[in-house]
């Protein structure tokens, strides 16, 4: 085996290592994972109140198990959202012609793998043993992730729910997490959480035990898990980005398969058991789950007593159990899922079939509204889908079509291509019938669910050199039937333009414009019939990052929003933000000072904020005021890390923050959070 590595190749590697070290200014270290920067890029068009903790957790787990570049196939590489089709093909071709990679330095010898790109992917990839990469015992030599994390946080100003006694528990929120794993080998962990106002310290608990790569058993999970196959029409819970600042790689899904669930989002996961078996050309996954779900259960309005039955109109996922009414809804429903996936591997791709049956112990019956006419009703839903993925030269084609019990069809397909080293292009077409029902789907689209939508999306990226990147997307969509707050069939479009200039590693400048137009009922309409008008949302963002040293970084940002009901009303808003990051010895600090002013909630400004590990903060700034936060991390020792965060919002207009039970009664809010992680 050693003779395979010629003296010429060893000499080349020595030169590349010297060049790599000189460029970085030091020998290659294990890079720190910077998910904050990655999330800011891909969700930069955020306009809705979406819980991003699920996305953050899935990305963190994906990146915590580095991808072995000597064993990764094209599907694995695409799942990272980092590689172009050209880079994927060049890597696979290099591996075929030269054998396995010996070291990370060798990536420089692959066309289109420059120093900046290698630095970007370094935290997320690894190189297996150069002499015997097929030796499965090598996995036991990897560093074990074995840690216990405890977090406590509180809003210092008591809300109305506490002062009036509506919330039965204390103001503090507690979070406990334990994890022990060898990447690609085994994993065991649990999470317990109590929200502010809840009485039970273990109000929400999840756990898992997982084995991987044990003979024919590729993946086995007992406990809480998620499954993702094809393009997400049948199974795709919790792991998708969609439209954003990255217009190419996020338009498709990869066969991620089974993953342990580690998020505090209290819904969208399976509790039971699942296993994937590697049978050579075919991989088969079988899963079964039984979940307790929150829901408001009532009796039907039938006149005949014998026909009366228990019904529910929605599945609750906010996970709050603070008041007597919220506690009464906890675990009121039993949900059972049985699913299977079979994937046949072909050269440069795969073909897969997925099936999922979901059943409830009570009848699902939406409210009697016209827009709910085609929604799911009953106790049981089955969905079956066929998906495929194929790579040809620098093109990757993907697609999936599925049918639910109602007869509704969902279909999505497209391509991602590297037209040249400088140009990338993506295309996505989708069609989801108004009666297409899938409880665990999350395919590409404008809406939050894969139902009642048709659309065509195209994305473009052009990099004339290493310093400049132009990127854009355009998406046109229609909704064949009515929607919530849209009392007529409607449609619209949105597009994004982004320019990035990175002359050096220390300087990054980008500006972005995003516009979206679609229909909505005219608010405060005095006529009997609702009037659907066009709304226009415009967002302009200018950002500059300056990193004068490894221990200091400045980020300045201006964001302007404009929201209008065309020909009726206009609302404007903006925010100016200054971020500072610095490291002093073992102490890392990140902070922000922001001024914001918006005319109403429609022109609110969403801004991603740094937080403690495993937590995500993406608040909406609206009204007029200032926002401050400071988060610190102290590495007390090799085993102990300590985080602390304080954030405060001051409203200059005197308007109290919050509403209902969450109203604070004052125009300011102060949140504090501390977290401790102990690594065994």
Image: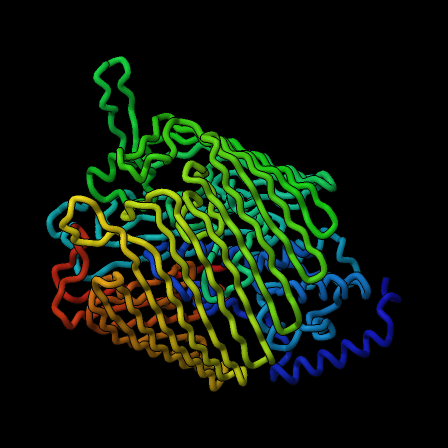
Q: From where the camera sits, is residue 35 visible?
A: no
Question: Looking at the picture, does residue 50 appear above or below residue 165?
Answer: below
Question: What residue appears at the point 81 percent right and 66 percent down from the top-left corner?
Answer: 98
Residue at the image position 23 percent from the left and 14 percent from the top: 304
From the viewer's perspective, tell me whether residue 196 is left or right of residue 209.
left
Q: Nearer the viewer, residue 415 or 174?
A: 415
Residue 221 image offset from top left, x and y in percent = 55, 40
Compared across the picture, whether 566 is left or right of 429 comes to left
Asked if 562 appears above or below 338 in the picture, the reply is below
- The residue sitting at 39% across, 50% down in the picture is 264
Q: Position of residue 190 (x, y in %)?
A: 45, 46
635 or 516, which lies in front?
516
Q: Quick one: quadrant of the N terminus?
A: bottom right
The residue lying toward the viewer, choosing from 476 and 281, is 476
17 shown above or below 618: below
Judged left or right of residue 237, residue 265 is: left
Q: Position of residue 379 (x, y in %)?
A: 39, 27
- Its colouring scheme is rainbow
């Amino acid at each position: 085996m050693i003779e395979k590595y010629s003296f010429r190749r060893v000499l080349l590697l020595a030169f590349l290592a010297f060049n790599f070290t000189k460029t970085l200014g030091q020998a290659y270290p294990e890079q720190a994972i910077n998910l904050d920067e990655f999330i800011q890029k891909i969700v930069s068009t955020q306009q809705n109140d979406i819980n991003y903790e699920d996305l953050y957790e899935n990305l963190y787990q994906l990146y915590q198990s580095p991808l072995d570049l000597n064993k990764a196939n094209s599907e694995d590489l695409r799942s990272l959202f980092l590689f172009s089709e050209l880079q994927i093909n060049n890597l696979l071709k290099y591996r075929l012609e030269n054998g396995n990679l010996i070291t990370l330095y060798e990536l420089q010898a692959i066309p289109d793998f420059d120093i900046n790109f290698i630095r970007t992917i370094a935290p997320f990839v690894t190189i297996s043993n150069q002499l015997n990469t097929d030796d499965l015992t090598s996995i036991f030599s990897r560093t074990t992730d074995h840690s216990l994390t405890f977090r406590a946080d509180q809003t210092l100003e008591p809300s109305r729910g506490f002062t009036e006694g509506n919330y039965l528990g204390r103001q503090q929120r507690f979070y406990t997490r334990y994890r022990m794993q060898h990447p690609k080998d085994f994993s065991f962990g649990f999470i317990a959480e109590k929200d502010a106002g809840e009485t039970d310290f273990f109000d929400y608990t999840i756990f898992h035990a997982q084995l991987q790569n044990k003979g024919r058993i590729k993946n086995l999970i007992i406990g809480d898990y998620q499954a993702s196959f094809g393009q997400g029409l049948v199974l795709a819970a919790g792991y998708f980005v969609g439209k954003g600042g990255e217009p190419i790689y996020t338009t498709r899904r990869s066969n991620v398969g089974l993953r342990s669930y580690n998020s505090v989002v209290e819904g969208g996961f399976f509790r039971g058991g699942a296993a994937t078996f590697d049978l050579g050309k075919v991989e088969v996954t079988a899963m079964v789950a039984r979940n307790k779900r929150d829901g408001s259960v009532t009796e039907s309005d039938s006149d005949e007593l014998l026909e009366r039955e228990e019904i529910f109109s929605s599945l609750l996922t906010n996970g709050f159990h603070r008041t007597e009414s919220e506690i009464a809804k906890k675990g009121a429903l039993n949900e059972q899922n049985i699913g299977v996936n079979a994937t046949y591997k072909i050269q440069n791709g795969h073909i897969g079939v997925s099936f999922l049956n979901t059943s409830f112990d009570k009848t699902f019956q939406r409210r009697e509204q016209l827009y709910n006419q085609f929604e799911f009703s009953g106790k049981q839903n089955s969905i079956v889908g066929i998906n495929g993925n194929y790579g040809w030269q620098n093109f990757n084609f993907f697609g999936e079509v599925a049918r639910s019990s109602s007869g509704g069809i969902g279909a999505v397909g497209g391509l991602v291509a590297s037209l040249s080293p400088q140009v990338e292009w993506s295309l996505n077409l989708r069609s989801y019938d108004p009666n297409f029902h899938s409880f665990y789907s999350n395919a590409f689209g404008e809406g939050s669910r894969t139902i009642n939508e048709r659309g065509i999306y195209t994305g473009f990226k052009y990099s004339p050199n290493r310093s400049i990147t132009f990127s854009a997307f355009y998406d046109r969509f229609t909704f064949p039937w009515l929607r919530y707050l849209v009392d007529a069939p409607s449609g619209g479009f949105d597009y994004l333009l982004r320019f990035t200039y990175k002359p050096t590693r220390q300087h990054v400048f980008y500006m972005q414009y995003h516009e979206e137009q679609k229909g909505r009922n005219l608010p405060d309409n005095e006529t009997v019939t609702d009037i659907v008008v066009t709304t226009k949302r415009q967002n302009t963002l200018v950002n500059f990052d300056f990193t004068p040293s490894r221990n200091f970084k400045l980020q300045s940002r201006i964001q302007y929003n404009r929201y209008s009901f065309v020909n009726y009303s206009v609302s404007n808003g903006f925010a100016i933000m200054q971020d500072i990051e610095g490291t002093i010895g073992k102490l890392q600090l990140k902070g922000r000072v922001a001024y914001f002013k918006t005319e109403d909630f429609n022109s609110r400004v969403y801004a991603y904020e740094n937080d403690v590990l495993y937590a995500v903060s993406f608040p909406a700034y609206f009204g007029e005021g200032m926002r401050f936060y400071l988060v610190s991390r102290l590495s007390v020792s090799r085993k102990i890390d300590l985080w602390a965060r304080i954030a405060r919002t001051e409203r200059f207009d005197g308007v109290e923050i919050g509403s209902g039970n969450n109203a604070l009664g004052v125009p300011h809010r102060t949140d504090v959070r501390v977290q401790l992680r102990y690594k065994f």
